[in-house]
Image (spheres, rainbow, N blue to C red):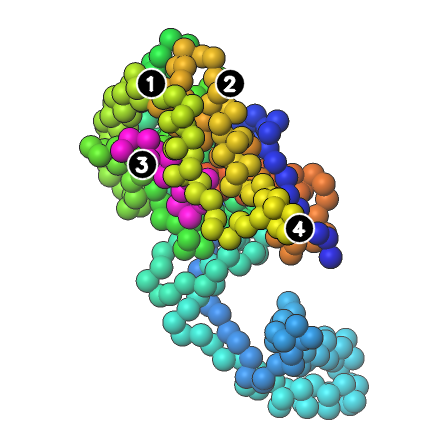
Amino acid sequence: MAPELTITNRMERSRWHGQGKEINADTIDEILEQAGMNWTVSKRPIVTTCAIPEKTKEGNPELMSFDGTKNMGDFRCSVNELIKNPTNEEIRKEVVRLFDETNWEYIPHTNEFSIVRNDINVPFTTMGRIYECLSNRTCIEMLEPLLKEGKCIIERAGTFNDGANCWIVAKFPDRLEVAPGETVDQYIKLSWSHDGSEKLSATFICLVEKDNIQFSPKVSAADTSIEIRHTTNAQKRIEIATNLFQKGQTYFKQVEELLGSLVTSVWTEKDMEKYLEALLPESTDNHPDAHGYVKESQKARKRNEIMSIFSDNNSSTGHTKYSAYTAVVQHCDHNKTIKIPKKKQENKSEGELITLRNESHLMGIWLKSGSGRKMKDRALNLIIK
């Protein structure tokens, strides 16, 4: 088995970590086609076997084949042979025997259904009776009114986990001017899932182009992320899109004020040391060895790395609270070590491992449970105290 893979992104500067596909389209059909998201999902019934299956050496039940159980597979083969040789008595007896054994082969699930990607027949998860499948088209159509009015441009779209999680990022035309030479682009990310892990939601994202870093700071007077009730009604979609645009304007106005206050607040290297100690406190278990030597911890390496980014900042933002916060953001976006579990590495090529690494990194920045996103939130909370 391959060892656990650890890769750092120190030289990685691709926007959105190179994930997804670039979009240059004006219609929903073109967007779906260019994104490779022009497929659907369906809710399908589930059955299990009557017979208790054999266990594999790992302790799990043996998986069913595409023919179902072994008995069902044998039954189908025998029936096929009987069709070719209808007078063969031996085959007829075998069909009768298998028919008796497979009469009650399956037990239907009455309260759970499988959610399946239709084009490649990949099941994503199981869901209950009240769950409704949400199509990629329906989700992207939420932005259609803004596209028609020229209020946003779809830049990129992609999926995680073979399509279980989908996303699309659109750019608003305005920019925030934080300081001379320091501009922030305004984005909205629409994301949804087909496995129940994520609701249809819109998240506002700030992107600093010169450093290619992204953040979504929480502000008291506006929502960073908004959950959306899906609908196929055209008028409702217009209302939702208008609401998103208005909320985006409110959010980015609040962010501009927040970043402006951070830029005007001086932050020394001594302040930075205390800040990083609070953000990445040292473990009490890190004791010296028999020779009095204390091995540098992972947290210490992170603190030193972030301090280096802060100290080397010679831009117009100088040594300020803003540069302290964005140093942490840059670490999360480009310097953070990504560990890929051994199981996920199996039978993967080098190119596939790089893609997996970049996907994991972006998910860590975007998802609520992601370590990168959590670290950015902690960093902001500490800096504005």
Q: In the image, which is nearer the foreground, mark 3 or mark 4?
A: 3
Q: Residues within 10 Å of mark 4 (few under 14, many from 20)?
A: few
Against 32, residue 254 (above or below) is above
Name the magenta segment's main secondary structure: helix
Q: Residues within 10 Å of mark 1 (few under 14, many from 20)?
A: some
* Cα separation between marks 2 and 1: 16 Å
CB within 8 Å, label 2 to label 4: no
State the extent of the magenta-drawn residues as a range: 366-385
Tell me, for residue 4, which label it has, or none. 4
* Cα separation between marks 4 and 1: 42 Å
* Cα separation between marks 3 and 4: 33 Å
Residue position marked by numbered label 3 in the rendering: 381
* Cα separation between marks 1 and 3: 17 Å
Whether 320 is among the magenta residues is: no
Q: Is residue 161 left or right of residue 367?
A: right
The quarter of the picture where residue 147 lies is top left
Against 95, residue 184 (above or below) is above
In the rendered image, residue 114, in percent from the top left (x then y), is placed at: 47, 63
Q: Which of disc 3 and disc 1 is earlier in sequence?
A: 1
In the rendered image, residue 24, in percent from the top left (x then y), is placed at: 50, 24
Q: Is residue 304 left or right of residue 196?
A: right
Against 293, residue 62 (above or below) is below
Amino acid marked by disc 1: Val
Q: Which of disc 4 and disc 3 is earlier in sequence?
A: 4
Amino acid marked by disc 4: Glu
